[in-house]
Image (spheres, rainbow, N blue to C red):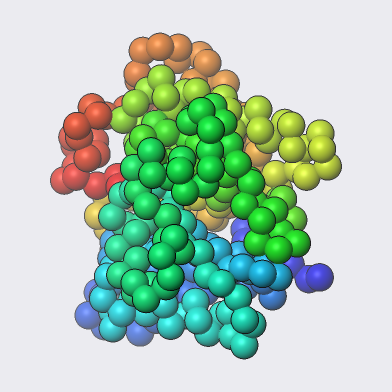
Amino acid sequence: MRRRDLGGVRWIRGAPDCDHSVDPPLQAVAVDDDTFVIRQSKCVHFEAPFLCLLVGSERALLHDTGATEDAELFPIRRTVDELIGARQLELTVTHSHGHGDHRAGDAQFADLGSGSIAPIGAEGVAGFFGIQGWPEGGSVLDLGDRAVDVIPTPGHLDDHVALFDRTRGLLLSGDTLLPGTLTVRDWNAYHESIRRLARFARETASRGHPVRQIVGGHIEMSASGELYELGTTYQPDEAPLPLSVEDLFSLEAALEDAGKTPRRITGDRFVVEPVAASENGPSRNRGRAE
Ligand SMILES: [Zn+2]
Ligand SMILES: [Zn+2]
C-alpha cells in the first residue's frame, strides 16, 4: 500500500490576517486509505491541534477531537463521517489527555452509543482502556486487523496516554512529545513516562514493529528550531510534524542528565518547560501550552 510521508506535508498554518484567510477550517491528510491525520486551522483556534483517525476492519478510532465545539466553525464530525465513508464501523473516540484543545469537539459525537467516548481523568482513562496498575501498565485496542498499544504517559497532564499503531509504526504522542514546548506539570511522572515510552520503542522494535514516526499534538516551532510566540495564529515556516525515535531517545537522555530537579531543557526539536502543577502554562505567557 502506498503511504504518504507526513514529513513532507504542507499543512495549513494560519494567516497574517485570519479575516481574509481562505484556508478550510481543518485539513485531513491521508497517510493511506485507512489512516488520516487532521489539523485544525490556526484561524479557527490558535492551538491548531492535530487529530488522528485510524480505521480497522471492525472499528474506527478518532484520537482527539480538536479545540472547538461548534460544528459550523470546525466540522470534525462531518469530516470523520466522510473519511469513514460507506464502511460500516463502530466509532470510538479517545483523547491524548483532558486539555480542552484535544476534546472540545466531543460535543459533535454526543449521539454515539454509551462507552464510545473515552472519559477524562486518569482513573476513567485507565478504566476505559482496561489498564491495570496505571501508569506502569498498558493495554491493546484491537480495531480489527489493527492493534493499537495504549501507553500511559502522565506528566504534561496526569491522564495523558500515547497510542502506538503497530501496523503503520505511528506513535501518537499528543502533548508529551511534539515539535515545540513540552510543558511538564509533574516532573517525576513525566520523566518516568519518557523512560516508559523509550523502553516501549526499544521493545516494539525488537518484536518487529519499530516506531517509524512520532506524531504529536501541535507544531510550535519553525523549521530552524525557533519557538513561535505563544498564541500566534500564523506560522509561516513551520517545522515538520513528525519526530523520530531518535528524538525520543535524545529527550530520554536529556531528562537523565537533568535528574530530579525540574529545569528548562532546550533540544533541537523541542523545549522542555517545567511549570507548577497548578499552572496552565509557562508564566511568561498568557496561559497557553494546553
Ligand atoms: Zn495539553
Ligand atoms: Zn494541546
- Residue at (74% x, 56% y) in the render: 167
- As drawn, which residue projects farthest toward the bottom? 86
Q: Image height check: is 249 above or below 109?
A: above
Looking at the image, residue 82 sits to the left or right of residue 233; the answer is right
- Residue at (26% x, 76% y) in the render: 70
* Figure disc tally: 0
- Residue at (35% x, 20% y) in the render: 263
Quadrant of the rendered structure where residue 284 is? top left
Residue 146, image x and y in percent? 71, 59
Q: Image quadrant for the N terminus?
A: bottom right
Q: Image height check: is 186 above or below 27?
A: above
Q: Image height check: is 86 above or below 199?
A: below
Is residue 22 among what the camera can see? yes
- Residue at (44% x, 60% y) in the render: 115
Looking at the image, residue 17 sits to the left or right of residue 40; the answer is left
Quadrant of the rendered structure where residue 187 is? top left
Q: Image height check: is 259 above or below 155?
A: above
Q: Foreground residue, 262 or 121?
A: 121
Residue 124, image x and y in percent? 38, 44
Looking at the image, residue 122 sits to the left or right of residue 3; the answer is left
Residue 113, image x and y in percent? 43, 70
Residue 243, image x and y in percent? 59, 46
Quadrant of the rendered structure where residue 259 is? top left
Looking at the image, residue 277 sits to the left or right of residue 265; the answer is left
Q: Foreground residue, 44 or 199?
A: 199
